[in-house]
Amino acid sequence: MEQVSLRVRSGRKPGSRESRRVRRQGQVPAVVYGPDVNPIPVAVDSHDLHIALHTEAGTNAIINLEIEDGDTLTTMARVIERHPFRNEYRHVDFVTVDLSKKVHAEVALHFEGTPAGVKEGGVFSPRRTHVLIEVLPTEIPAYIELDVSEVEIGGSLRIEDLPELENVVYLEELDAVVMSVTVPAAEIEEPEPEEVELLEGEELEEGEEPEEGAEEAEGEGEEPESSE
């Protein structure tokens, strides 16, 4: 995996007031830490940070942080806070990594092909866009391809169907669904209300249901007249 270099300014004071001042200067407040590194507050140019996080590796890029008046540390951006409305970074945590030890990384999934079920009228339903893996930092794939062309209507692919990659371990549940092809939702027609036959001269009040036996013949139950 390609490595990028990023210069950062040390000596940043912690606190929200200082962070606002740093942002007004076109920089992003950040912190560097790791197993053998005490937290170091730093500031990084927002444009340079954007470039570093938009290589083919994305947010999994290996970043060599060149700390002003300090050492160069091998890191990865692991906590990235973005502005909720504007396309800008608010804060970044850089975590030091050992290139000889595996790390956890989220990698994008690329679905290849058109599912057979979609050609028959089904709906393609992706359930996941990324997958969590364990791998050496230098071997993190830019993305993982999954061929979905043979999935029929009602079918799905799971984590266990992802391709086997050398030195890559999937950390998700193997039966977790990655994508599926579903039947299109059909319009449900409401049944028309049943007509109720009323006796002559009888009306139903609004919301009233007919009584059981209301359709019996008129006069039923009366005693017959005497035939003397």
Image: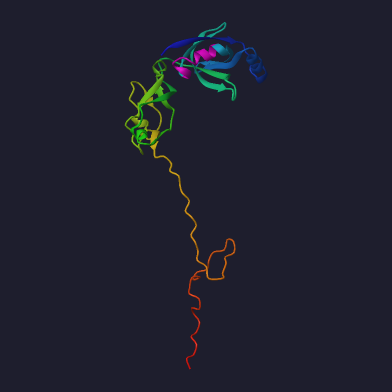
Confirm whether the magenta stretch covers residue 50: yes
The one of 149 and 106 positioned closer to us in this rendering: 149
Residue 59 in percent (x, y) is at 48, 19
Residue at 50 percent across and 57 percent down: it is 193
Where 7 sits versus 114, above or below?
A: above
Where 163 sits versus 7, above or below?
A: below
Where 163 sits versus 46, above or below?
A: below
Confirm whether the magenta stretch covers residue 20: no
The one of 16 and 69 positioned closer to us in this rendering: 16
As drawn, the residue found furthest toward the right would be 17
Q: Is residue 35 left or right of residue 170?
A: right
Q: Name the image colouring.
A: rainbow
Tell me where residue 131 sits by quadrant: top left
As drawn, the residue found furthest toward the front would be 200
Residue 87 in percent (x, y) is at 57, 20
The one of 86 and 228 positioned closer to us in this rendering: 228
As drawn, the residue found furthest toward the top would be 69
Q: How many marks?
A: 0
Query: Which image quarter is the N terminus in?
Result: top left
Tell me where residue 185 sits by quadrant: top left
Q: Which residues are magenta?
A: 48-59
Residue 67 in percent (x, y) is at 55, 9
Residue at 65 percent across and 14 percent down: it is 24
Residue at 56 percent across and 22 percent down: it is 81
Q: Is residue 52 left or right of residue 13?
A: left
Residue at 49 percent across and 70 percent down: it is 215
Residue 36 in percent (x, y) is at 50, 16
